[in-house]
Amino acid sequence: MTGNPPAADEYRIPHYIAITEKLKRGEYDISSQIQGLGQLGQALYELAKALEHRYREFQYLDRITANLNAGLLLDEVLENVYNDFRELIPYDRIGFALLEDNDTMLRACWAKTNASDIKLTIGYAASMAGSSLETIMRTGQPRILNDLRAYLRDKPQSESTRLIVEEGYQSSLTCPLVANNMPVGFMFFSSLLPNTYTDVHVDMFQRIAGQLSVIVEKGRLVSELAAQKQALEEKNDELIRLNDLKNTFVGMAAHDLRSPLGMVQVALSFVSGHADMLSEGEQQEMIEEAYRQSRYMLQLIDDLLDVTRIESGKLELKPEPITLPDFLQDITARHNKLAASKNTHVTLKPPPGGTITADPVRLRQVLDNLISNAVNFSPSSSQVTVWLDRLPDGWRFNVQDEGPGIRPEDREKLFQDFARLSARPTGGEKSTGLGLAISRRMIEAHGGHIDVESGPGQGATFWFTLPA
């Protein structure tokens, strides 16, 4: 006959009941109550330790999820995951990917590690069709790979696994994220050591994945709303800027067209109605003045239309091959004739041979503006020098004058709309204040850059680059 004596059972059963009641209340320290209870008592002790460990895990997870929920944007949430989850899951790297295109594509959106360079970078995308991740998402079961190198040997076509192995990781845990019964994406925990996830509780990872899914989806939605809000604010700022620009245009037209129109009207009135009171020389002078004023008004209108066209995105470049030596010689020869009235010389240094693909009308417009500015701001009997430099990846065009130079307080105004500098044209020439701003936009539209090298009293060299 086997079994415990009846007296022993009568002694132990109340203790078993007391221990189970204690465990039900969440009191796990039963070490003092298992004395004399034999193997069953030891089993109850091990059960108590396991329950306490799981309880601590759940408490820790609840604290973490409360902390995660405090983060609003997705990046904040993921940063908190990386900082706080180490007591639950061992890892050296965490990656996050979102499903896109009706859940047909998976795109890496976030990753962090302190162990190595990231090769599986943000923006990496792969199709879900036929992949192992598709199965994981369908079943909702986390996947554990404790030997990534062996997995890669079996699945050599897995580009993402190859990249993770190249980063030095040897084991991984993949958690599918599902919120409101809708797949969201995946969280990837990776370790530099093999067999990191051998002794794990899958149900704990499922609980973690469930909590993360809701929090991450909340962060993603908040991030999207924040991005949309920022885009609306930027659009609104742009509309305000364009409205201010429009008002400036209207004010510019009203102010700068009124005076020359008045002068044209007076000149034409005298020539047509009072010709007998004017000598032939005076009539000719009035006609020339009317022509100068009308040319200025036409230039102003052209400049305003150019800026409007650029700001509205309707500027269309028509690039074609340009033979640079012939192009520059033609422009400088024409300006040299125009500068003769100020006894100013426009000189072209012999340019290197070569061609460039650009819009010849717009390129000529920029050079015309820079050279005419150089002539206008240079003293009589001075020289304006134009030359071309060959760069490794393009060309640099240079226009140098012997004018007053650019003061430091004027540098910030250059290339801005309606810029008025402290220096004035030496021959009383008028300026719309738009030429350099338009030139900057033209050069940037070609993929180049424009700037100036100058100091007070040292002249100025305006230059711009264009890619080959």
Image (spheres, rainbow, N blue to C red):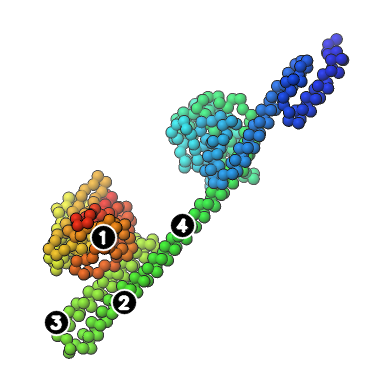
Residue at image point 51% right, 33% down: 93
Can the viewer see residue 265 in this picture?
A: yes
> Residue 426, position in %: x, y?
19, 66
Mark 1 or 4 closer to N-term? 4
Along the viewing direction, whichever of 186 and 61 lies nearer the viewer: 61
Mark 3 or 4 closer to N-term? 4
Along the viewing direction, whichever of 322 and 110 lies nearer the viewer: 110
The reply, left or right, for residue 198 in relation to residue 453 is right
Tag 3 residue = 281
Question: Which amino acid, mark 1?
Answer: Val
Please tell me whether mark 1 sits on a helix, a strand or a loop. helix
Tag 2 residue = 258
Rendered image: mark on residue 288: none
Question: Which amino acid, mark 3?
Answer: Gly
The reply, left or right, for residue 62 in relation to residue 304 is right
Q: Nearer the viewer, mark 1 or mark 4?
A: 4
Q: Nearer the viewer, mark 2 or mark 1?
A: 2
Q: CA distance from mark 4 to mark 2?
A: 35 Å
Q: CA distance from mark 3 to mark 4?
A: 58 Å
